[in-house]
Every structure is written in C-alpha cells, then in structure tokens.
Amino acid sequence: MSEKQPNMLNVDQQEILDSMQDFADRSQRIMTKFLEAQAEDDGFQIPDPYVVGKAFLKASTQLMQDPQKLAEAQMGLWQEYTALWQHVTQRMLGQTSEPVAKPVSGDRRFKDEAWEEEIYFDAVKQYYLLTARWIKSTMADVKGIDENTQAKVDFYTRNFVQSLSPSNFIATNPTVLKEAVESQGKSLLKGFQHFLDDLEEGKGKLRVSMTDVKAFELGKNVASTPGKVVYQNSLIQLIQYAPSTDKVNKNPLLIVPPWINKFYVLDLQPKNSLIKWAVDQGHTVFVISWINPDETLAHKDFSCYMQEGPVTAIDVIQEITGAEQVNMAGYCIGGTLTTCTLAYLERIGKADKVKSATLFTTLTDFVDAGEIRVFIDEEQMDLLDAHMERLGYLEGSEMSQVFNLLRANDLVWSFFVNNYLLGKEPFPFDLLYWNSDPTRMPAMMHKFYLRKMYLENKLSQPDGIELNGVPIDLRQIKTPMYMISTHDDHIAPWKSTYTLTQLVSGPCKFVLGGSGHIAGIINPENSGKYGYWTNTKKTADPDEWLSTAIQNEGSWWQDWKKWIGRHSGRKVEAREPGNKKYKPLEDAPGSYVKVRMVD
C-alpha cells in the first residue's frame, strides 16, 4: 500500500488559502447585510456628499475667476517641488541637505526614524507635506464665497488632505512594510480580518474599532464607584454614591452629565474618577444617568430633559438628604442644561434650591461654537430633521462620526493604520471604551437644541427660549458659579464659554485648564499634568483675561475643592443611599447606562 502523499503546501501557504476563502465568504455576507440595510435607509449621511460637493463647487468656481492667482500658486508649488528634488539629489550623492518641509511638532504619523533616515520615505513625506500645505492654503484663500461655505471648504479640505497621508498606505509607510516583512505577511492578513470585523459590526458601514471593548465591564473595571440607583423615570436613573468618610458635607452634590455620551466619563477607573474623588472629599454625590432613548421617546424635548432631569433630581435629593440646598455641576450639554435650570428656577421663584453651580466646558453662547458648526446650517438641519422624524432619534454612531472628524488624525487614521495596516489589536483604553459607547438623541430634543442654540443662538438672548412655557434669561442667574473650560477644547471653545461670565448677575469664577474637552477635565490631582489659569478679574475680553491670569501647576481639581468647600455647609453624619420613600432599586451604575449602541 502506498504511503500517504505529503501535503505539498506548507503551513503558511495553507493558512493564507484558508484566510482568503474566509475573507471571500465573509465579504459576501457583509455585502448582503449592507444591501439589506440600504433598502431601509433614507440616504442620510454625515457628512452629506451633496452639501460637501456644493461647497467645493462654489469654491472652485470662484478660484477659476482669478486664473492669474491660481497660476501663481501653482508656480510656487512647482518651485517647492524643484527644491525638494534638489534636496533628494544631494542626499543621493551623499551630501547633507536641509529638508524643504518638516512635520509640525507632535505629528505622530512620521515618528518612525525611516521617514528621515531613508531617502525614499523622506522624499515621499516631504512631497506630501508640500502638497498638503499648498492645497490647504489655496482653498483657504478663496475670494467671493460666504463664511459658512469657506468653513466647510477648510474643514473638508483638511480631512481630505489627512486621508491622503502616506502613512495611511501600505507601500508608503515604512513601519507597515517592516511589520509585513517580519511577520511574513501575517500582519496584513490580520489587518484585513480586523477590517471585515468592523464592517460586520457596522452592517456594511465601516466603524473603526478604537479599543478592545471586551476588556471592560461596567460596574467592574469602569463605572465601579459603589452606589445605588435611588430613583428613575422615563429619562433618568438617579444614582447616589455610598459615602467613604464618616462625616459628609451638609449640601449634597448633583452632577448633570451630557446625554450625547454617558456619565461614566466621570467615573472611568478609581485612579481617574472625578465621582470617586468627590465622594472621598466628603460630598454626598448624586449623578444623573440618562437613558439611551429609542423611537418611543421621540417626543421628549429639551423641557422634558430639564423637568425630568435636574429639576426632579433636586426635589428627590432634598427629600432623601433633608438638605435645603444642593450644589450642581454640569458637563458640556449637561452644563448647558444646568444653566437653563438655574434661569428657570429664578423665574419661578425657586432659585434658593441651588447653593452653587459648577460648569465643565459649557457653551451658552453659540456664535463661535467651533468646527462643529460645519455640520449645522438650514440646509443640513432640514435633512437631519427629516431623518430624525423617520427614525424618532439620531443614532449615536452619527454623532460619534462628527466628533471623530474633528480630530481625524487621532480618532480615525491612527486606528486605521494600527488595526488594518499593522494588524495589531486595539489597545484596551478606558477613555476610548467610553468614546465608543455613544447614545441616541430623541428627535424633538435634538431639533430644539441644534436650532434654538447652535443655529439661532437664542439661549444667550433675554427670554430667547421657553422651557415648560417659561421664558428664561441667563442674566437673572444669581447663583454663585464656578466655570472650568479647557485651552485646547475643539467642541466648546473656551473663549465662547467665557461669554457667560459677562451675562450672569451672580458671582462667577472662571478657570482655564490645559489640554482639551475630556483630558483637561478628567485630570486628577496627582496627575501633575496640564496646569490651569486663574484670574480674580472678570474682564470683558477673554484674551485680556488670559494675558493677566496666573498659571498654576497641577490640576484644577485642587482649586475647585477649595471653592466648592465654601458652598458645602457644615459636616453631618454620612448618608447611605436612599431612604424609606426612595428605596435603592439596583446597584450603580444602573441599567440605563448599560444599553449600548449595538443593542
């Protein structure tokens, strides 16, 4: 009997063939799911291709009106290309030569030494940098188009240029090529598997994974500060945290987080949890956990969020603790709602319920609301309204895409390279886990918020908006206020947040932290990062405020601890969550926060 013939394919070859067959099968399934989803889709996209195309058509038309200027710009680019090739030639001849174009400091796309040491990659890098700079400068100087169109052109030009970076392609990324060679191509196979995984997760739409979501579990290694849900309604669960000190401050602290994302950005892990830190300072901490709404809550408007959110929460907290006054702290849109609540309570004669208010990176004047305004105008609002009317909500993934595009190099392309080109697993990171866990927006609430605040800027105007049928005026707010904004915030620009200091009637302390919208706020005392600026003067001009401000080392938490302490009252016996009327319903972080986008 003849011996069994050996397999002529080695293990690696067979692995490649098996992978290719698996890729083909999965690709067919993904395409089927994508086509099924498209059949039910209304065609809404962020960004909308028609809106983007129209902006560039206007800009291109105006550019063609001045051919001499365009020709001069092109000539300047060719001169820079000539200088680049001279640089390359000198290097090839073994001579030293200063580069024609350099990446900006901190540009992590070109951190591999090969981008400088190897002539080919150095040339590719500089060619890209010169071209990118030329495209952006040419499109940023278009005469004859309106400010809104120019903002769109600038934003999408930058995103287009970032997408074309040589670091985003296999053949022009030295790190990717080295990894492919060392792994004998397995890194590319693994990367394509990750690519298909993300397509399957998005039902045919690419959702780039930022972290290993399986590495985290709410209530275990994130959002793990002990507490109980002591109240809930159709929009909120109210969590009261267990005390960690024998004595606590008389005035409890209510935190109003944003509902565009989930509250546990303030309770990621014990080492960086603002909630745990506040509990350890002797505060009786309550936090609102917003529901992740579906189409049944489409009718919930901004007034509902105020009434069923902080207004109700204050009443419940007073009944549980017996305290006459509550300190409030609101983050981002939660801070906007907090400010609205203060103005509302002033109008109805109940402002004394709130002892003080702290606002984290909060916009109340939306004249200059940052680059997010690129997505908000009448044309795009009409498209969004029609989409939300059909679904009853705006899907969380749409909001995530908007925020990711604001920092595409960090929040899109870095993961594209890591996951797909290098074939590496996403790194477990608590903040990115939270970032990948967005919430939906009820149609009526989101429509009101975008139109009345972003589009029409009515909140900053006296009686500009009504909540629960009551016109509100921020100028009537007398509650002592602490405002912390961050220097590099791309969502709530600090100079825009500063405007509120000139509107409210009560005492207002403004503090400017370092870094951005999240890192600048979640900055524990022992981090030693970023620093913060303080100023006893409340000048009308934010630039003047900063020029005369004192820069302090460390975290703003240490400054806020002193301020909030002056509004927290005497010490009383520690309070366990709930009471006879409000019996604990479940352990923190509750069930509302556990509903993920994929559910």
Image (cartoon, rainbow, N blue to C red):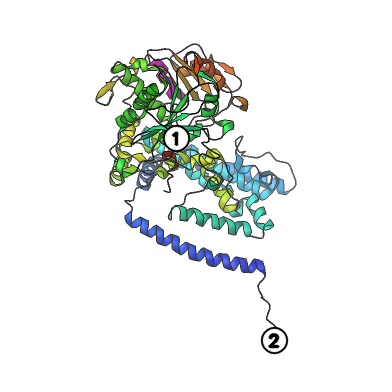
Residue 501 magenta-highlighted = yes
Say which mark, if any, is on residue 141.
1
Magenta run includes residue 404: no
Label annotation for residue 2? 2
CA separation in Å, label 2 and label 1: 79 Å
Work out which residue is located at the far left of the displayed protein and give it. 469
Magenta range: 494-507
In x, y percent, where is residue 532? 56, 21
Q: Nearer the viewer, residue 318 or 208?
A: 318
Q: Main secondary structure of the magenta part?
A: helix
Instruction: Classify mark 2: residues with Cα within 10 Å, few (<14), some (14-19) or many (20+).
Output: few
Left or right, 79 with respect to 300, comes to right
| Secondary structure found at label 2 | loop
Residue 515 falls in image quadrant: top right
Q: Label 1: state its secondary structure.
A: loop
Up the image or down, 440 lies above or below 577; here it is below
- Between discs 2 and 1, the one toward the N terminus: 2
- Disc 2 marks which amino acid? Ser
Q: Quadrant of residue 1?
A: bottom right
From the top left corner, tell me how far across and down residue 591 is, in percent: 43, 40
Q: Nearer the viewer, residue 262 or 66?
A: 262
Residue 202 x/y as whole percent: 44, 52
